[in-house]
């Protein structure tokens, strides 16, 4: 978290001394450290004049203020300064807690409680989508050059791109990914962050530690045994009635396939879509075990803002959870504000739309049309749809979502 102040110092040509030998959870627990910084949190700043400060963003702001060219980072007009603060507060108050709630349980810094972790992940994805939407037509967050907003937001994005945002996620948040690459490629960042290695696969929760077998309890005294017998209930009274078994999905009765859908999903997520992933799909496709469907929203004339249309796709996908084992698809937001559409393709297990899909609340809002994937025009559309770009798309792609 000391990246922010160091990058700010680099941009402005300031000399900022650091303590590379500082040992986390050791040096910040000493009485001397706590006497100066009672919270015990890092990073901290102590000036030559004894001035002390905590919080990474506050320190970065203070460092910038010490430069005669501070306006280049902090804004030259009231509007720029306000917008820079807006993104800084968003990163610290909204995005950072959601990131921590998602990553800390996965890293073992706090217990992994699935409902809480899933809720934090949904918040995180929502905030990433907000940034992705803002950056659709911007190189930097405020103005045409790096400001403190970019330093704070990009530094807070480092862990997300390093541990969480796998290749498929980066395709989904392509504007944000382009922005992050642009910012960390600047010399002031590169000298602090170094060569950046992007996430290849999302970090997963650690398997719970096996519980040690309890030591055998000492044998109770005879008197205690007798007492137990007196209050012992018949076994028949304690047994619960067997729960009815859940009916298996009809999809499970389909003949085995030579291409497990998870294999395609993994290959798609970890490779460039064109030509690598789509070539793999056509070479390995079990044509008898899968079908392709063109999916189009029925009420495109009601769609307005692009980001709202994209959020509608996300809502539909969240209600398709039961179908995740049997379906893969991309739905794209095409067009412009107040003139856009939802369009895409799905691969489904079997030759019919499974009940796991038709049962979704929004299913009736979409037109599902079976297609022949061997037709050259259709195949080109499928490839460009899965890549989110290409001449076969009906219109310019603004954004989209992947169901996998």
Image: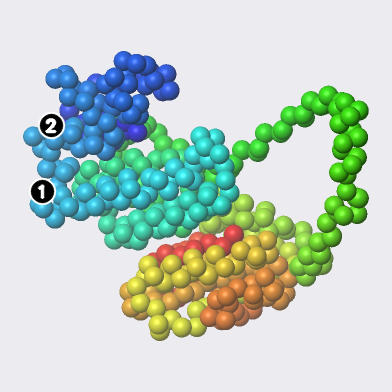
Disc 1 element: loop
- Image quadrant where one finds the N terminus: top left
User: Depth check: 212 or 67 in front?
Assistant: 212
| Left or right: where 151 falls relative to 276 | left
Residue identifier under label 1 = 76
Q: How is the image coloured?
A: rainbow
Q: Is there any visible trace of residue 2 in the rendered image?
A: yes
**Identity of the residue drawn at 8% across and 34% down:** 68
Residue 314 on image: x %, y %: 49, 65
User: Depth check: 84 or 370 in front?
Assistant: 84
Residue 117 on image: x %, y %: 53, 48
**Identity of the residue drawn at 32% across and 21% down:** 34
Disc 2 element: loop
Q: Return the mark for residue 66.
A: 2
Residue 3, compared with residue 341, is above or below; it is above
- Image quadrant where one finds the C terminus: bottom right
Crowding at dot 1, Cα within 10 Å, few <14 / some 14-19 / many 20+, comes out as few
Give whichever of discs 1 and 2 has the lower sequence position.
2
């Amino acid at each position: 978290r000391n990246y922010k102040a160091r990058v700010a110092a680099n941009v402005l040509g300031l000399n900022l001394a650091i303590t590379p030998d500082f040992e986390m959870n050791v040096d910040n627990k000493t009485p001397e450290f706590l006497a100066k910084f009672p919270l015990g949190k890092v990073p901290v700043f102590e000036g030559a004049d004894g001035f002390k400060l905590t919080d990474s963003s506050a320190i970065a702001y203070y460092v910038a203020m010490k430069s005669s060219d501070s306006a280049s980072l902090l804004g030259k007009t009231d509007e720029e300064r306000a917008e820079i603060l807006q993104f800084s507060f968003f990163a610290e108050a909204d995005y950072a807690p959601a990131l921590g709630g998602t990553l800390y349980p996965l890293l073992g810094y706090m217990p992994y409680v699935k409902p809480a972790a899933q809720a934090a992940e949904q918040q995180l994805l929502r905030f990433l989508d907000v940034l992705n939407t803002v950056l659709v037509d911007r190189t930097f967050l405020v103005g045409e050059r790096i400001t403190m907003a970019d330093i704070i937001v990009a530094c807070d994005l480092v862990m997300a791109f390093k541990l969480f945002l796998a290749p498929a996620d980066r395709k989904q948040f392509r504007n944000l990914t382009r922005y992050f690459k642009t910012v960390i490629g600047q010399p002031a960042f590169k000298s602090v962050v170094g060569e950046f290695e992007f996430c290849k696969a999302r970090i997963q929760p650690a398997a719970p530690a096996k519980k040690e077998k309890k030591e055998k309890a000492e044998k109770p005294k005879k008197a205690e045994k007798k007492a137990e017998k007196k209050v012992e209930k018949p076994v028949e009274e304690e047994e619960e009635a067997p729960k009815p078994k859940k009916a298996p999905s009809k999809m499970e009765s389909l003949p085995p396939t030579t291409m497990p859908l998870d294999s395609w999903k993994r290959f798609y997520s970890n490779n460039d879509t064109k030509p690598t992933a789509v070539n793999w799909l056509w070479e390995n496709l079990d044509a008898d075990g899968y079908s392709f469907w063109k999916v189009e929203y029925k009420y495109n004339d009601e769609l307005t803002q692009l980001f709202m249309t994209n959020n509608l796709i996300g809502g539909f996908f969240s209600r398709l959870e039961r179908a995740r084992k049997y379906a893969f698809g991309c739905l794209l937001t095409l067009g412009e504000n107040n003139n856009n559409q939802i369009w895409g393709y799905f691969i489904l297990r079997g030759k019919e739309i499974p009940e796991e899909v038709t049962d979704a609340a929004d299913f009736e809002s979409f037109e599902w049309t079976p297609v022949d994937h061997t037709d050259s025009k259709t195949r080109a559309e499928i490839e460009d749809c899965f890549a989110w770009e290409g001449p076969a798309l009906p219109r310019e792609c603004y954004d989209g979502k992947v169901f996998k």
